[in-house]
């Protein structure tokens, strides 16, 4: 058991969340390729993972909305099991949905922590004096000429 867990942790360092192993794309045990439905499911899963990863730190509204949709689809564990739910897609491709989901959440927290550590801890404000226009002279209150009629 110790050898297996060591192999799994070494494999996690090599194979990232964004990668799909060739044995998952081509079923080497049966020697067959993915069916059309499985290729569609793989494209759906790959797109959702890409949108999720691009939107984690996104500031733009469109990317952020796409990220929220992808996150809801990925995190909906067993709520609704339809043909193209995250769990069904992963099962059809031979991927453990719980492990993939957990890996994506860990990745998200790691990326957010790294972004927060790079962010400045306080707001820096540089105050510069306004330039004075020396070519224009203005008259103050005391400089006004008043005429007094007698």
Image (cartoon, rainbow, N blue to C red):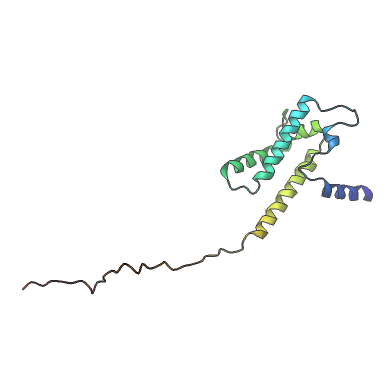
- In the picture, measured across the screen, residue 86 lies left or right of residue 147, that is right
**Whole-percent x, y for residue 30 in the image:** 90, 28
Is residue 11 shown above or below 30?
below
**Most extreme residue toward the top, as rendered?**
36
Q: How many marks?
A: 0
Q: Residue at x 68, y 42 (%)?
A: 52
Q: Residue at x 70, y 32 (%)?
A: 80
Q: Is residue 11 above or below residue 140?
A: above
Instruction: Give how far across and how far down residue 124 sits, in percent.
Output: 55, 65
30, 143: nearer the viewer = 143
The answer to which of 76 and 21 lies nearer the viewer is 21
Query: In this rendering, would 136 be left or right of 104?
Result: left
Indicate the position of residue 97 as horizontal and vertical percent values: 78, 38
Which of these two is toward me, 22 or 82?
22
Q: Is residue 37 above or below residue 1?
A: above
Q: Residue at x 73, y 32 (%)?
A: 43
| Rendering coords of residue 66 (x, y %) | 62, 39
Left or right: where does residue 55 sit relative to residue 36? Answer: left
Compared with 146, 101 (above or below) is above
- Looking at the rendered image, the quarter that the C terminus falls into is bottom left
| Residue furthest to the left | 150
């Amino acid at each position: 058991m110790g050898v297996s867990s060591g192999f799994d942790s070494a494999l996690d360092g090599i194979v990232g969340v964004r990668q799909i192993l060739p044995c998952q794309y081509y079923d080497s045990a049966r020697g067959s390729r993915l069916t059309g439905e499985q290729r569609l499911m793989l494209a759906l899963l790959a797109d959702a993972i890409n949108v999720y990863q691009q939107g984690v730190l996104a500031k733009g509204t469109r990317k952020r909305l796409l990220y929220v949709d992808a996150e809801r689809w990925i995190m909906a564990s067993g709520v609704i099991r339809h043909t193209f739910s995250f769990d069904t897609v992963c099962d059809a491709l031979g991927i453990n949905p719980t492990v993939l989901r957990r890996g994506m959440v860990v990745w998200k927290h790691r990326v957010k922590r790294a972004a927060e550590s790079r962010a400045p801890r306080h707001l820096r404000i540089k105050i510069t004096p306004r330039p004075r226009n020396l070519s224009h002279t203005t008259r103050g209150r005391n400089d006004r000429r008043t005429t007094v009629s007698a």
